[in-house]
Image (cartoon, grey):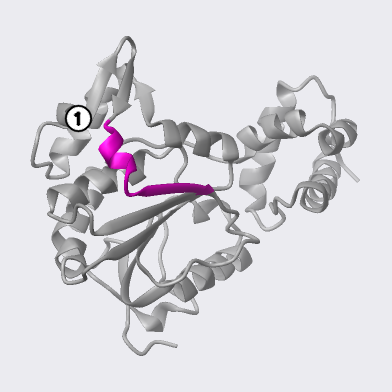
Amino acid sequence: MNNSELFDLEMKLLMEGIFQVYGYDFRDYAEASLRRRLTQWLSGSGFATLSLAQSQLLRDPVLFEMLLRGITVNVSEMFRDPSFFKEIRELVVPYLKTYPFVKIWHAGCASGEEAYSMAILLQEEGLKGRFRIYATDIDAEVIRKAQEGIYPMQELQRFTKNYQQAGGKASFADYYTARYDRAILSPTLRENLVFATHNLAVDADFGEMNLILCRNVMIYFNPSLKNKVLGLFHNSLAPGGFLCLGSKESLEHRQLAARYDEVRPRTQIYRKKYGAP
């Protein structure tokens, strides 16, 4: 067995151990991505091999949290991909306005920027007090940061530009207070946000959502886990509800494809058909 094959074996054994001890299931993550992230973590860990790290990882929750930071992807920004948020404003919001109250699930929300962006967008479209956003992520630490709603001021120039390109109707400065080198988002944005930990691989579905967003998360899953998670979303989505995926993700050739219509070609915004099982 060569070094590459041995590393893959160690990786599989470690992922099984993590699932048994901590309940985090990375066994169906895309191998190439997982191998790359583990290799990067290992290089700065002080351990020569995954086998040498495994015993301590399974016994030391603090060390495991450090590994978790390396495995999960927590990169986000306000109004990320402005054209997507503009499409939500133009193509999805008119339907949401027809409901007295709407429920939205941001799955894999990282540190919360996109969930706060959605709160801003919905308030600007006249839905204030008529929506609730459930923002979830596997990583409890990033959820804690998301709940704080505090971001580096150095990011605000990019956030502001994104907001404007996404069709923002006010001044982005209205939504935060600058304090030293931090921007604190308005508490009113958090009133309709619920942050919680959720593991897409093993946890249950949410019920009767009108809009589900999971963007650039499933690219790290293997085909089996992708189908499982899409099934989770399908069971959580009300008839006529919308499912939004990342730019490199699609329902094309998926088992559920026939149960959805793409709202506009190449937007990765899908609407669940009425009567779809």
Q: Is residue 67 magenta?
A: no
246 shown above or below 66: below
Residue range highlighted in magenta: 186-196
Depth check, front residue: 218 or 160: 160
Q: Which amino acid type corresponds to the residue marked 1 in the rendered image?
A: Thr
Q: Quadrant of the C terminus?
A: bottom left
Please, is residue 8 above or below residue 145 in the view?
below
Q: Does residue 259 appear left or right of residue 142 in this picture? A: left
- Quadrant in the rendering for residue 157: top left
In screen coordinates, is 156 left or right of 204? left
Q: Position of residue 191 (x, y in %)?
A: 32, 44
Could you tell me residue 11's position as x and y percent? Answer: 79, 45
The reply to whether residue 109 is in sight is: yes
Q: Residues within 10 Å of mark 1 (few under 14, many from 20)?
A: some
Residue 249, position as x, y percentages in the image: 42, 59
Residue 58 figure quarter: top right
Query: On the picture, is 53 further left or further right than 180?
Result: right
Name the residue tied to disc 1: 160
Q: Looking at the image, is 267 positioned above or below residue 136?
A: below
Q: Is residue 127 above or below residue 119?
A: below
Residue appearing at x 65%, y 61% in the figure: 202
Residue 219: image location, x then y, percent: 51, 53
**Residue 193 among those drawn in magenta:** yes
| Name of the residue lying farthest toward the left | 169
Asked whether the viewer can see residue 80, the reply is no
Relative depth, front residue between 61 and 45: 61
